[in-house]
Amino acid sequence: MGFKVVTPPHFPKPRGYVNGLVAPSEGGGRTLHISGQIAWDKDAHIVSPDFATQFLQALDNVIAVVREAGGGATQIVKLLVFVTDLDAYRAATPAIGEGWRARMGKYYPAMSLVKVAGLLEPGAMVEIEGVAVLPPQA
C-alpha cells in the first residue's frame, strides 16, 4: 500500500516507533498518523520543567512532523493530549492558549485530553499525538 515514514531531520532517531506514517487515501489525498510527541529538543532533552513550555514544544514537534510530510498545522484533524497533572494543565491554560494562537490561529481540530499516571520519558508531563489529512503530493 505504500506507506511513507516521516521524521523531521532535526529530530532524534526514534527507537521502536516512527514519528509519522503517511497512508495514501482514495482520491489521492494522504492521511498522516503522528506518534506521541513530547517536549524534547533535537538532542532528545526535555526543554523545560514548565508545563506550558512542555505543552507548546510537544505541539511544535507535532507540527514539525506535519510540515515534514508536506502539510501545515491547519491540516491536523485530531489531537490526543496526555498530561500527568491536570492542575498544572489548568494553571497553564492562559500561556498554552497564547502559544496555541501563535501557532494555530483560531483553528482547533477535534481533541481529547487524558490524564495519565506517567509518561515513558522521565520529566515529560505532556505527550501529544495526532492525525492530519494532507493534500495529494505534487
Image (cartoon, rainbow, N blue to C red):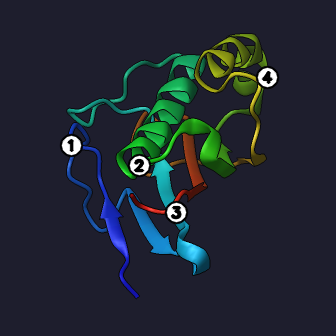
Front-lying residue, 51 or 81: 81
Mark number for residue 70? 2
Read off the residue under disc 1.
9
Name the element at disc 2: loop
Name the element at disc 4: helix
Read off the residue under disc 3.
33
- Residue at point 49%, 38% (across, down): 63
Kind of residue indicated by mark 2: Gly
Name the element at disc 3: strand
Q: Left of 124 or right of it: where is 91?
A: right
Kind of residue indicated by mark 4: Arg
Separation (CA) of disc 2 from disc 4? 33 Å
- State whether residue 82 is above or below residue 63: below
Q: Earlier in the sequence, mark 3 or mark 4?
A: 3
Q: Position of residue 49 (x, y in %)?
A: 47, 19
Which of the two marks, 3 or 4, is nearer to us in this view? 3
Separation (CA) of disc 3 from disc 1? 18 Å
